[in-house]
Amino acid sequence: MTFILLQIRQRLWGSNIGVTTNVRRKRAVIRFLAFDILIFVLCWLPFYTTDVISDTVKIVSDESERIDENEAYSVLRFSFIVLALSNSFLNPLIYAFFNKNFLNEVRLMMSKNRFCHCFLNKVGPVTTEDTQASAVPDVKTLGVT
């Protein structure tokens, strides 16, 4: 992914290309993807690094049981697992805050002090008595007594 993004970046930021609205949008997407990949690497690299080092030490020496029983190693490994899994928490936040429509709506809600009422006035499917009756069969129709 990094190699492909670097090639795309080279084309979009090259001197031969004119800056149009379409190019600006593509550049914004590339910035977002680069940031997303950076966060992914920062979250997962410590876990994989310690895992590879630990496995290498276990293979090279007879210290496998001592490494697994080491309390400091266990705490470090647990911390890196939590950091790695936090990427799943961070990803939706990154996507949300790089989306201009999302940011504009949040600003609008905050500026009009409508934050508490944000779940009101939701548009949902219109249900009438006819649609409710057809969607949920009557107990008598099912033959249940």
Image (cartoon, rainbow, N blue to C red):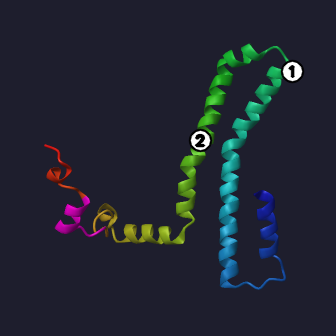
Q: Residues within 10 Å of mark 2 (few under 14, many from 20)?
A: some
Query: 3 or 144: nearer the eye?
Result: 144
Numbered marks: total: 2
- Range drawn in magenta: 125-135
**Three-letter amino acid code of the residue under disc 1:** Val
**Three-letter amino acid code of the residue under disc 2:** Leu
Q: Is residue 96 above or below residue 68?
A: below
Q: Main secondary structure of the magenta part?
A: helix
Image location (x, y in percent) of residue 128: 20, 68
Image location (x, y in percent) of residue 136: 23, 56
Quarter where residue 144 is shown = top left
Asked if residue 129 lies in the magenta stretch, the reply is: yes
Image location (x, y in percent) of residue 22: 67, 81
Specify the label residue 60 is tagged with.
1
Quarter where residue 27 is shown = bottom right
To which residue does mark 2 refer? 85
